[in-house]
Amino acid sequence: MANSARNTRPALDAVNFFLADVRDGLGPYLAIFLLAKQDWNAASIGIVISVGAIAGIIAQTPAGLLIDSTRAKRAVIVAAAVLVTGSALLMPLLTSFWWVAALQTIQGVAASVFAPAIAAITLGIVGPRAFAKRLGRNEAFNHGGNAAAALIAGALAYSFGPIVVFWLMAAMAIASILSTLSIPADAIDHELARGLADAPGEDHAEQVSGFRALLASRPLLIFAACTTIFHFANAAMLPLVGQKLALANAALGTTLMSVCIVAAQLVMVPVALLVGARADVWGRKPIFATALAVLALRGALYPLSDDPYWLVGVQLLDGVGAGIFGALFPLVVADLTRGTGRFNVSQGAVATAQGIGASLSNGIAGVIVVAAGYSAAFFFLSAIAAAGLILFLFAMPETAESRKPKVEGPGPMSVPIS
């Protein structure tokens, strides 16, 4: 297992780096394109982004079931990358509300497989003991890829306009496909990838609804609620910042958005590595609580100034919150599902819940902007994050085995890395 993990390290690094720009879709760049080039208002932009998010919500649990059941995990990633990129390339040609909504739906459904597939492949290669550290490395390369893509987009957009982000996504998609296919198929233990870590009595053919798995575990249900709140508070913040920058200077809107993204992504790289290295020592709970606290602070700081330097500076805090979340989310789900064989479907169920928060975020924030302005929207999102922090501190237990009280009898099942 250890030799396989070492041999696949460059391929996993490359997949996470190049897939970064593809798995997130057009993100805030779509808001800038529609606002600056198509003259859409904030409410329409929020609604059409929410349409894609809702499609992703519906697909999350089936995506988890698919990843749990299939041995063609690499092929699933390749097919999804083709669909996401193809639909993005059509958007500059098909710019009516309904066409953009349809293409966003395709992206949302296809992108739902990326996170569980990468987490499953990683767990299937390195096993549970090395999972936390490898997740941190995955997220570091993911954020590095996002930063590189944003730098390129920002530099090229100054000369060619917002359209450049569509072509950049196509180039990253091709590289991600080649990287995915470079992972040896036989390096993935598909039983470990489901979270079946050494469960000899498990009925491998048994399947369970993602929502049943979620409702059967109180800690998993609480974690789902907290991640839903996190995404509700977080999802609309960067698109709103992008809109403010575009309104202040339409010609530099994409470039300034790229600066915001790069600034945050550069912070996320060391944060993700730190979380991966220390999550087993410090525990999951204090680290995730920090992410919620930083998110609440970030929302409260944005309205204090419209100066681009201030907005970019505040955006650095996104690097702390998102860096923590990306590295911890699959790790906590793995903690709570170890030995069940339902790691990926549980990921899908929790992601469905958090997707509800993200989809509502853009729509509601857009309506608040139209009715009361950008500052009101930011303060509202900040208050939601603070409420999530309170819930997490008082209701969520620690899930790291190293931080739990010692008890008599056998512990959670795991497979040693040899």
Image: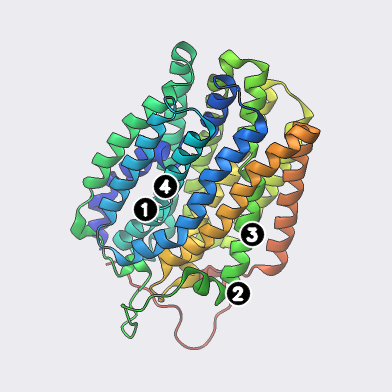
The percent coordinates of residue 246 (x first, y second) are 62, 21
Residue appearing at x 28%, y 63% in the figure:
70
> What sort of colour scheme is used for the picture?
rainbow
Q: Secondary structure at mark 3?
A: helix
Query: Which residue position holds label 2?
Result: 218
Tell me which amino acid carries mark 4. Answer: Ala
Residue 244 location, quadrant? top right
**Badge 4, how many Cα within 10 Å: few under 14, some, many 20+?**
many
Tell me which amino acid carries mark 3. Answer: Cys
Query: Which residue position holds label 4?
Result: 111
In the displayed structure image, the side of residue 216 where residue 68 appears, left or right: left
Q: Secondary structure at mark 2?
A: helix
| Cα–Cα span, label 4 and label 1 | 12 Å
| Cα–Cα span, label 1 and label 2 | 26 Å
Residue appearing at x 41%, y 62% in the figure:
62
Query: Which residue position holds label 1?
Result: 118
Query: Which residue position holds label 3?
Result: 226
Q: Nearer the viewer, residue 323 or 172?
A: 172
Q: Of marks 2 and 3, which one's residue comes earlier in the chain?
A: 2
